[in-house]
Amino acid sequence: MNTSFDAAFAIKWLASIIQILGYTATAFGVTPLNIYLFLAGVAGWFIVGVLWNDKAIILIHVVAAGAMLTGIAAST
């Protein structure tokens, strides 16, 4: 089996679960933990985009991370 496929498979599921926890934290008003969970999930999906050489996945997650980091910086 392809090792990069195996890594991407594991990372995408872990990142997805982390993002679901971020949505749950948002629903219950658990801040700023929700943003940190989203950042971890976005980082995971960015890595998957790199492993798959998928520029669309890379782009959307770079933009999402930038938006969240800008929001964090603006709120401090």
Image (spheres, rainbow, N blue to C red):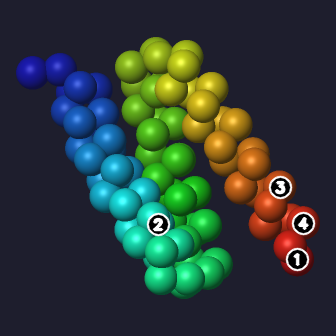
SS for callout 2? helix
Q: Can residue 49 be spotted in the picture?
A: yes
> Which residue is nearer to you in this view: 29 or 47?
29
| Residue 66 rendering spot, x and y as whole percentages | 75, 45
- Report the side of 5 relative to 53 (left or right): left
Which residue does the numbered mark 4 point to in the structure image? 74
**Residue 7 relative to residue 43: left or right:** left
Percent across and percent down for residue 31 are 61, 81
CA distance separating discs 2 and 1: 20 Å
Near mark 4 (Cα within 10 A), the count class, few <14, some 14-19 or many ≥20, is few
Q: Are marks 2 and 1 in contact (CB under 8 Å)?
A: no
Per the image, the residue denoted by label 2 is 22
Mark 2 vs 4: CB contact within 8 A = no
Image position of 76 with respect to 51: above or below: below
Compare marks 2 and 4 and give the one earlier in the sequence.
2
Q: Position of residue 17 (x, y in %)?
A: 31, 58
Amino acid type, label 3: Thr
Question: Disc 1 marks which residue?
Answer: 76
Residue at left offset 67%, top offset 47%: 65
- Between the residue at mark 3 and the residue at mark 1, the CA separation in whole angstroms equals 10 Å
Quarter of the figure with residue 62: top right
Q: Is residue 18 visible?
A: no
Say whether marks 1 and 4 touch (CB < 8 Å). Answer: yes
Q: Quadrant of residue 30?
A: bottom right
Relative to 41, does residue 6 appear above or below in the rendering?
A: above
| Residue type pointed to by label 4 | Ala
Measured Cα–Cα span from mark 2 to mark 4: 20 Å
In the rendered structure, which amino acid carries the disc numbered 2? Answer: Gly
Whichever of labels 2 and 1 marks the residue nearer the N terminus, that label is 2
- The answer to which of marks 3 and 1 sits earlier in the sequence is 3
The quadrant of the image that shows the C terminus is bottom right
